[in-house]
């Protein structure tokens, strides 16, 4: 076991400053010593705030990768650069955490997984909702068979008016899609992980741009520009798994629906069911009676009920760093994340062709 890791950050925008850097800076075994961004001022600001003494700043991430002292690289770029940067970092001998989604395309996701296998370096993807207290609880319950065989599930990623109007979120070329690839990916990852089912058989999907063309629309982050809103505003999919289970996937940034859910799940099994909104509910039948039990958590990510105040982001980053230090498998594996990317791409492809997409 190593006692200290030197970490470099590629992409010093909102996700790096809001999640990765604050969580990494809390860990005693981490030294934040290299920062790269195409906007030099962002890298300089991040280095000044979070960097170790002597931290270096690079305009070109490839120069950062030439530094043989860097052990771990966190990739926090737009989606279209995930594969390029992650593969280059793996080939340079670095362990890599890449933000979600794994890549803009399924082919790129597969290339990333192959690079990790070929280099023997660790690769994980930033699916932080697995690290919520309710998610950790349900993972144990599902693994223990409390729900029996989970044969129907819903992956919820619905915002009523929550279009991100900053950065490149609305740019199809940079991102590959809209709410499906942005927040739908979280809900799908969480649901498949709880089911422990990564073998899709067929996907039927639809995608819409019904509200995106509207000007001066009400929106949490301010009205969007219809001219630059080039991605879908909602997308839906039905996934049939090889064992016969069905997963309904729903995502939106803008939809006329009051009861919305984001990064939530509904699970239906032979022995019981579960769903989570503001609280986790378990249901089933016992002794000839139907029951519902509530398990109290802060589903935003901090587990106050056990006395811990570690956020889901802090827990995610800590467990990743511990996996590198202890040479163990990360919680989110590249193989799992690759399946998520394949299903998301299949939804888009099904919408484009009007036909179901079948997996070998």
Image: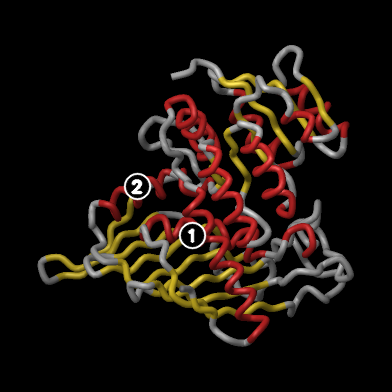
**Label 2: how many residues lie within 10 Å, few (<14), some (14-19) or many (20+)?**
some
Q: Residue at x 80, y 57 (%)?
A: 165
Comes first in the chain, label 1 or label 2 = 2
Residue ID for mark 2: 137
Q: Residue furthest top?
A: 53
Q: How many marks?
A: 2
Q: Which residue is most to the bottom?
A: 354
Q: Residue at x 65, y 44 (%)?
A: 87
* Picture residue at 62% right of the left edge, 66% below the top: 180
Is 354 displayed left or right of 46 in the figure?
left
Query: Residue 92: horizontal and vertical position, in percent?
Result: 66, 33
Secondary element type, mark 1:
strand
Q: CA distance from mark 1 to mark 2?
A: 14 Å
Classify mark 2: helix, strand or loop: helix
Q: Quadrant of residue 200?
A: bottom left
Residue receiving disc 1: 264
Q: In the image, is residue 88 above or below residue 175?
A: above
The answer to whether residue 222 is above or below residue 43 is below
Residue 310 horizontal/vertical position (percent):
48, 32
The residue located at (46%, 39%) in the rendering is: 330
Residue 130 % position (x, y): 46, 48
Where residue 4 sits, quadrant-wise, is: top right
User: Callout 1: 10 Å neighbours few (<14), some, many (20+)?
Assistant: many
**Residue closest to the eye, 79 or 225:** 79
Q: Of the numbered discs in the image, which one, if any, rests on residue 195?
A: none
Of residue 297 and residue 27, the one placed in the foreground of this image is 27
95 on left or right of 11: left
Are the residues at dot 1 and dot 2 in contact (C-beta closer than 8 Å)? no
Q: Is residue 119 visible?
A: yes
Q: Classify the position of the N terminus by image quarter.
A: top left
């Amino acid at each position: 076991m190593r006692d200290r890791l030197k970490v470099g950050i590629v992409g010093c925008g909102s996700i790096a400053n809001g999640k990765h850097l604050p969580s990494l800076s809390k860990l005693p075994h981490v030294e934040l010593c290299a920062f790269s961004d195409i906007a030099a001022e962002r890298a300089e600001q991040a280095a000044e705030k979070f960097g170790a003494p002597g931290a270096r700043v690079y305009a070109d991430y490839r120069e950062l990768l030439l530094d043989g002292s860097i052990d771990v690289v966190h990739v926090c770029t737009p989606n279209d650069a995930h594969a390029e940067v992650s593969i280059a970092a793996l080939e340079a001998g670095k362990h890599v955490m890449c933000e979600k989604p794994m890549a803009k395309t399924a082919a790129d996701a597969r290339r990333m997984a192959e690079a990790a296998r070929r280099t023997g370096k660790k690769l994980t993807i930033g699916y932080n909702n697995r690290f919520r207290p309710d998610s950790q609880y349900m993972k144990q319950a599902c693994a223990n068979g409390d729900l029996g065989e989970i044969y129907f599930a819903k992956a919820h990623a619905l915002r009523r008016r929550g279009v991100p109007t900053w950065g490149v979120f609305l740019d199809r070329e940079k991102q590959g899609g809209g709410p499906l690839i942005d927040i739908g990916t979280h809900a799908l990852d969480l649901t498949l992980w709880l089911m422990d089912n990564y073998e899709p058989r067929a996907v039927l999907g639809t995608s819409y741009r019904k509200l995106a063309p509207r000007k001066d629309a009400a929106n949490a982050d301010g009205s969007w520009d219809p001219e630059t809103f080039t991605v879908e505003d909602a997308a839906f999919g039905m996934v049939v798994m090889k064992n016969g289970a069905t997963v309904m996937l729903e995502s939106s940034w803008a939809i006329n629906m009051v009861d919305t859910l984001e990064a939530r799940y509904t699970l239906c099994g032979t022995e019981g069911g579960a769903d989570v909104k503001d609280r986790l509910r378990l249901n089933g039948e016992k002794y000839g009676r139907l029951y519902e039990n509530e398990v109290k958590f802060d589903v935003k990510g901090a587990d106050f009920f056990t006395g811990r105040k570690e956020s889901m982001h802090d827990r995610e980053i800590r467990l990743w760093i511990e996996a590198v230090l202890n040479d163990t498998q990360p919680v989110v594996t590249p193989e799992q994340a690759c399946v998520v990317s394949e299903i998301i791409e299949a939804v888009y492809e099904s919408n484009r062709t009007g036909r179901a997409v079948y997996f070998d």
